Image (tube, rainbow, N blue to C red):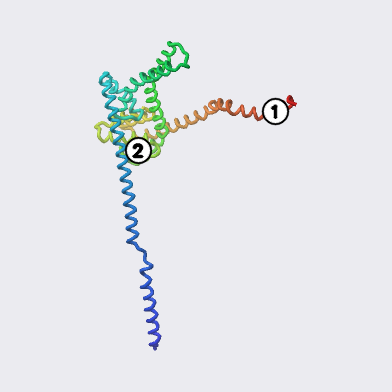
């Protein structure tokens, strides 16, 4: 038989235990509501900071745009008065600007204005320096020739800047072009259309080669909005000016025209571009000894001679001094 006293003791023990748990539960529970409010407040502050940063960036961009618009308007007025706006609208100049990565009419206007203004400015500055400085003793004819040379430099400088920028841009695109072709081959052989393949390649190249990614993105947009896909591809070749891109455009146009397998053509192009990139790397490696000859003669050999002959020279000088 169950002892009544043991039952009472067990019930009292259980009641005491439950009482202790009931008293301790409020202290053991975490304040989820308070933590959530803190997280919400922190997130609100982060969003406010991001919004303020976006507003500041937009204000800076708007101020820069206003300044560019004012300067562009001033240059446009000057070119209109001199009847030189036709040069800024020429297709050849527009192609040069596109290959350098400068889109729109503003860069072309700035280019024409700089080619007109820089010679005058540099010639005037050079003339002021040469004719006002008393320490420079040169004939007047020599000074005039130097001023003419400064004007020629000012006339050629914008063209040199544009050509160098376009060349560097083409080099960056050519360097990562084989990787883009490999990705395009994978997309095409997986059954993806050319437009979607270019979109995918542009996304993958956004961090590796932003320039090539932008060009592919523009091409996909032109394919969507233009009625002729061939025109969009030709625009890609015109904007880049790189030979590998032109070969890709030619292969795509021929494949679309004659119905040849696109994957095979792209794979052949990818292999050729990889071999060309390896050949360029081997060429650079082969030219290193010739390029290092002059630095070694100027910096390495004198130090070597000092180390080898220096102690003997010091001993000889000490002998003569004694």
**Residue 169: image location, x then y, percent:** 39, 30
Frontmost residue, 247 versus 19: 19
Q: Secondary structure at mark 1?
A: helix
Q: CA distance from mark 2 to mark 1?
A: 67 Å
Mark positioned earlier in the residue sequence (2 or 1): 2
Choose top left, top right, bottom left or bottom right for residue 242: top left
User: Residue 216, relative to residue 313: is it above or below?
Assistant: below
Image quadrant where one finds the C terminus: top right
State if disc 1 and disc 2 touch (CB < 8 Å).
no
> Which element is circle 2 on?
helix
| Front residue of this view, candidates 243 and 23 | 23
Judge the density around disc 1: few (<14), some (14-19), many (≥20) Cα neighbours within 10 Å. few
How many numbered dots are placed on residues in this image?
Answer: 2
- Quarter location, residue 227: top left
Residue at position x 26%, y 36% in the image: 224
**Front-most of 156 and 95?**
156
Tell me the number on the disc at residue 314: 1
Residue 6 versus residue 113 in the image, above or below: below
The residue sitting at the right extreme is 322
Give the residue drawn at x 46%, y 13%: 138
Q: Which mark is residue 202?
A: 2
Report the mark closest to the observer, 2 or 1.
1
């Amino acid at each position: 038989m169950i002892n009544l006293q043991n039952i009472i003791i067990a019930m009292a023990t259980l009641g005491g235990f439950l009482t202790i748990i009931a008293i301790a539960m409020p202290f053991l529970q975490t304040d989820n509501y308070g933590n959530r409010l803190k997280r919400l407040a922190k997130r609100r502050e982060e969003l406010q900071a991001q919004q303020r940063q976006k507003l500041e960036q937009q204000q800076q961009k708007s101020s820069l745009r206003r300044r560019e618009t004012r300067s562009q308007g001033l240059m446009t007025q000057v070119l209109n008065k001199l009847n030189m706006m036709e040069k800024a609208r020429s297709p050849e100049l527009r192609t040069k600007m596109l290959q350098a990565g400068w889109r729109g009419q503003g860069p072309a206007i700035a280019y024409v204005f700089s080619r007109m203004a820089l010679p005058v400015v540099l010639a005037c500055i050079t003339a002021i320096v040469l004719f006002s400085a008393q320490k420079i003793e040169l004939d007047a004819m020599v000074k005039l020739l130097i001023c003419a040379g400064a004007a020629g430099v000012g006339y050629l400088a914008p063209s040199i800047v544009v050509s160098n920028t376009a060349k560097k841009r083409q080099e960056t695109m050519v360097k990562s072009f084989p990787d883009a072709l490999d990705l395009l081959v994978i997309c095409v052989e997986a059954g993806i259309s050319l437009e979607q393949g270019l979109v995918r390649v542009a996304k993958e190249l956004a961090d590796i080669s932003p320039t090539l990614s932008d060009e592919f993105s523009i091409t996909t947009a032109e394919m969507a909005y233009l009625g002729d896909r061939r025109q969009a591809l030709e625009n890609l070749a015109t904007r880049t000016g790189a030979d590998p891109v032109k070969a890709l455009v030619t292969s795509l146009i021929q494949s679309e025209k004659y119905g040849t397998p696109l994957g095979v053509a792209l794979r052949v192009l990818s292999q050729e571009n990889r071999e060309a990139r390896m050949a360029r790397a081997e060429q650079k490696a082969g030219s290193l000894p010739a390029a290092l000859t002059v630095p070694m003669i100027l910096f390495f050999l004198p130090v070597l001679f000092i180390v080898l002959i220096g102690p003997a020279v010091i001993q000889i000088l000490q002998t003569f001094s004694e």
